[in-house]
Amino acid sequence: MKRSRKAADASMPAKIDIRSVASLARVSIATVSRTINHVPTVDPVLAARVWKAATDLNYFPNTQARALVSGKSRLLGLIVSEITNPFFPELIQEFEHAAVAHGYEILLGSTNYETKTMELCSRRMIERMVDGVAIMTFGIEDFLLDRFTADNIPYVFIDPAPSRPLNSVLAVDYRAGIYEGVQHLAVLGHRNIGFISGPLNRRSSQSRKAAFLSCLESTGLKANPDWLIEGTHTLDGGHDAMQKILASPNWPTAIMCSNDMTAIGVQHALFEANLKIPGDFSLIGFDDIHLAEYTIPPLTTIRMSCRDLANKAIENLLSRLNSPEGQPEDVSTITTRLIVRQTTGLPRNALQDLKQKPSRKSRAR
Amino acid sequence: MKRSRKAADASMPAKIDIRSVASLARVSIATVSRTINHVPTVDPVLAARVWKAATDLNYFPNTQARALVSGKSRLLGLIVSEITNPFFPELIQEFEHAAVAHGYEILLGSTNYETKTMELCSRRMIERMVDGVAIMTFGIEDFLLDRFTADNIPYVFIDPAPSRPLNSVLAVDYRAGIYEGVQHLAVLGHRNIGFISGPLNRRSSQSRKAAFLSCLESTGLKANPDWLIEGTHTLDGGHDAMQKILASPNWPTAIMCSNDMTAIGVQHALFEANLKIPGDFSLIGFDDIHLAEYTIPPLTTIRMSCRDLANKAIENLLSRLNSPEGQPEDVSTITTRLIVRQTTGLPRNALQDLKQKPSRKSRAR
DNA sequence: AACTTCAGTGTAAACGTTTTCCATCCGGTA
DNA sequence: TACCGGATGGAAAACGTTTACACTGAAGTT
């Protein structure tokens, strides 16, 4: 009665805890703890007995108890936008890989772009005492960040949060890749380029759009509002956005998308409309998910290395975790670059134009 | 000195725990606990004070401590094969949705088809004291199952594990959908059908292959070993498998795939070889991931509803969790069915054959 | 008026670990 | 022989909760 809250009926297998191991190995629980934590001062003979007992009993230490007393959960939080966008599984996999390499596990949260869900995710991270958290999605509310700070949990953003310390941001150089993309199109002869963004309540969507606009300008091209569509970073979003562009009075000759899923949606809208890629429209995606190689035709896209992203995030978190006081680590930068495949080509009617007004080509330079 | 292990320097924000809430609300910690756990007997006046204090302090209860003492983590484990196969994120999302609806969170594990990783995942599940676990991937070693049993953790499989209790299996009726698929092809006139399986060390891969073979037979068709390829359930695997088939002396006129990613890989191999779908080859996938609607052309496939799968798994786990002693729940069955899109059509040379030997068509019936 | 109930509250034990501190043991030295 | 110091092991406190139990009043019953 004393031992257990529930009546322990004989048929029930005995609980396997540190005490069972200790008694089987004929040592104290302290010695068991020291042994499995590889404290060097324990006598090899006892250690051997402990290991034998532990494996015989199939003993797994209880992480919750461990975390509770040590104050370290060896858990890293990862909050992403949407697990069904293949970019994130790839990121998650890299993140997990890097985490495990450093002896951590990950606790995953997916916000589905909802503020409420984001709050729930953050709560979970705190309740489960993560040692650090990587926020790979849009704006988190300040009171949650304050709560992280109060619990001394370092966090890292994928994009500049203006109000927050510099050592907690992972700066992505969207401009590099997007500039390459715009240049690539311009060189092919495209002058009219549309852009389908992600949901604009996300900082990273805004950044990508802003980068596009700025690159357009520095290439000497003008944006047409009809071709600047807010998408949702989903297949359906890309499809619908392209239909809107097709419904506009003039058509661009090329489309850039804020992510690859959008681009695949665009491909499909064009397929339905019986328009050819790159014959009728050139298309550039963003992210370079594995699938991009496998679309028909394979997608020209801008690569943002999720391995880089994951490694830099973990590195940042870990260094702040282990250092005395979150010193101002230099800001990590993630670069992006164009991967040319088969969805970009000469603009529609390029040959025809060439024949009719041969002067234009030379004028364009 | 007594209060804290580390010297508590004044600059450090005070820990927010149940005690802080209790003292701010001027009640005992028991009352705080009862309030936040919605025990009905607490005086509304005090409850109000507690809630106010909790929100003022931004208090989140520590899940680890909670789990430790109550013996319930309110965590459900989910072990999948491979997070980068889009079927699984869709499944995970459904699973999480259903779990949250019942007040549970999920702990995710991804095995990448490696036995070692599977063991690590299972360990984590046990160490973190999950209340139940759904195993949506291939064979787990017996000693791990025994450990689950020892800890009184109910588990559920996606496929019959012969040696295990019936109430822990989720039986998928692969045959229903595959039969529809084979029939569909046969009616179109296909007599030579290839099959690209998943990795055959997985029970569910074996089941799908066996179902295909059996359906082929009952349709009166014969299997050709050259067209029975073991794939990997990945894009690359599908691509490579199709190349093998193209290298064989005779070509089938249709291909069925054990999952959609494989089918997309096949599409790409055919694109590279400049062969048309469904003109040269008809193609059927399996799973019906969201992407299947978006391939070019859209993929005919066999739907296995991951919502069904997730809901049934959770239902099963929960009912065994709450019932006195794991009573023999009736086995849940998941059905599959054909979704016809645009990758299936008449066999290659069908019209030609028709012209040349009109008798064949009638003989075929 | 003296019991019984009972709702509502607080105290303290438990959960399974880690970690501090102290006791013991050993060999070596004076 | 007595003493010291360095290993090494064990007892017990601590982590932040839940929950069994005991206690308090007030209300209802005789």
Image (cartoon, coloured by chain):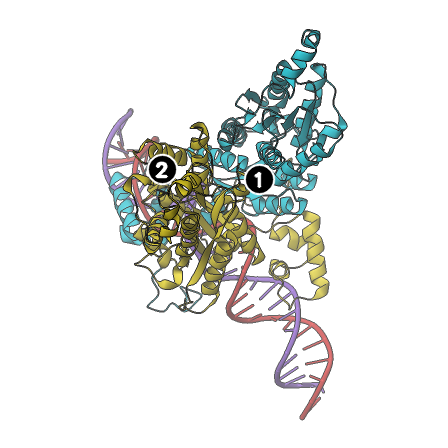
Chain colours: A yellow, B cyan, C red, D purple
Labels 1 and 2 touching (C-beta < 8 A):
no
Residue type, label 1: Ile
Residues packed near mark 2 inside 10 Å, few (<14), some (14 to 19) or many (20 plus): few
Q: Nearer the viewer, residue B91 or A4?
A: B91
Query: Disc 1 or 2, which lies upstream in sequence?
Result: 2
* Total numbered labels placed on residues in the image: 2
**Circle on res. A120:** none
- The answer for how far apart the CA atoms under marks 1 and 2 are is 34 Å
The foreground one among A194 and B315 is A194
Labels 1 and 2 share a subunit = yes
Q: Residues within 10 Å of mark 1 (few under 14, many from 20)?
A: many
x, y percentage for residue A144? Answer: 34, 51
Question: Residue B245 location, x and y as percent?
Answer: 70, 32
Using the image, tell me which numbered label, if any, was put on residue B79.
Answer: 1
- Image mark 1: chain: B
Q: Which quadrant of the view contains residue B9?
A: bottom left
Mark 2 residue element: loop
Task: Quarter of the image for the N terminus of chain B: give it.
Answer: bottom left
Q: Chain of mark 2?
A: B
Q: Nearer the viewer, residue B52 or A185?
A: A185
Name the side, left or right, on which C21 lies relative to A353: right
What residue type is disc 2 on?
A: Val
* The quarter of the displayed image where residue A263 is located: top left
Q: Which mark is residue B39?
A: 2
> Which quarter of the image is occupied by the C terminus of chain B?
top right
Rendering coords of residue B104 (x, y %): 46, 37
Q: Nearer the viewer, mark 1 or mark 2?
A: 1
Would you place residue A277 above or below residue B357 in this image? below
Q: Is residue B57 visible?
A: yes
User: Residue A62 in the image: x percent, y percent?
Assistant: 56, 50
Q: Which quadrant of the view contains residue A192?
A: top left
